[in-house]
Amino acid sequence: MDEARRATLEAEINEFMGRYNAGFTNGTRADLEALVHLPVIYVSETEAQVRDRYPFDPEKMRAATGFHHPETTARIVHLEEARAHLIIEGTRHRADGSVIESIDSFYILHKRDGEWKVSVFSGIRGARPTP
């Protein structure tokens, strides 16, 4: 893959991640489900699960934690025309900027019918100390 093609694919993935983060910030479970291949593989603390729907409800998360916005850094560790592996380091914040938690995740994205979507993901809460 030449550098220009890689840059194009990276831009597509960065745009996708912006929509994915917006799903948590002000979306619904249905909004997030539109960004994953169903069934989706979720690797929990104890097992890999095949889910027919997105396993988390962002509206409930916002209500329970006061989540307002994330700060995330996504690093693409492997990239092909239709598959990408990402490591995402994130911190969830309230509206006043205070930290709720850190969460580091591993995602596998697949591009089907011209769209990137999540196929597999797993996150570890508290993976990094928070201020």
Image (spheres, rainbow, N blue to C red):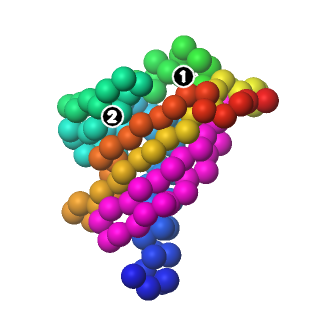
**Residue 118 belongs to the span the image colors magenta:** no
Query: Would residue 91 appear left or right of 53 to someone viewing this image?
Result: right
Query: Would residue 130 appear left or right of 112 to someone viewing this image?
Result: right
- State whether residue 42 is above or below residue 64: below
Q: Residue at x 73, y 30 (%)?
A: 130
Query: Would residue 127 appear left or right of 131 to someone viewing this image?
Result: left
Residue 12 can be seen in this image: no
Q: Nearer the viewer, residue 18 or 129?
A: 129
In the rendered structure, which amino acid carries the disc numbered 2? Answer: Tyr
Q: Residue at x 60, y 32 (%)?
A: 127
Q: Earlier in the sequence, mark 1 or mark 2?
A: 2
> What stretch of residues is rendered in magenta?
70-93
Residue 92 locus on image (x, y percent): 62, 32
Few, some or many C-alpha atoms within 10 Å of disc 2 (few <14, some 14-19, many ≥20)? some
Q: Provide the secondary structure element on which disc 1 rests.
A: helix
Q: Residue at x 42, y 37 (%)?
A: 122
Query: Would residue 12 appear left or right of 99 to someone viewing this image?
Result: left
Residue 44 locus on image (x, y percent): 38, 27
Few, some or many C-alpha atoms within 10 Å of disc 1 (few <14, some 14-19, many ≥20)? some
Alpha carbon of mark 1 to alpha carbon of mark 2: how far? Answer: 21 Å
The quarter of the rendered structure image containing the N terminus is: bottom left
Q: State whether the magenta stretch is mostly helix, strand or loop.
A: strand
In the rendered structure, which amino acid carries the disc numbered 1? Answer: Arg
Q: Provide the secondary structure element on which disc 2 rests.
A: strand
Residue 84 locus on image (x, y percent): 38, 60
Quarter of image, res 28 = top left
Residue 73 can be seen in this image: yes
Q: Residue furthest right?
A: 131
- State whether residue 106 is above or below residue 57: below
Q: Which residue is mark 1?
A: 62
- Residue 42: numbered disc: 2
**Residue 78 belongs to the span the image colors magenta:** yes
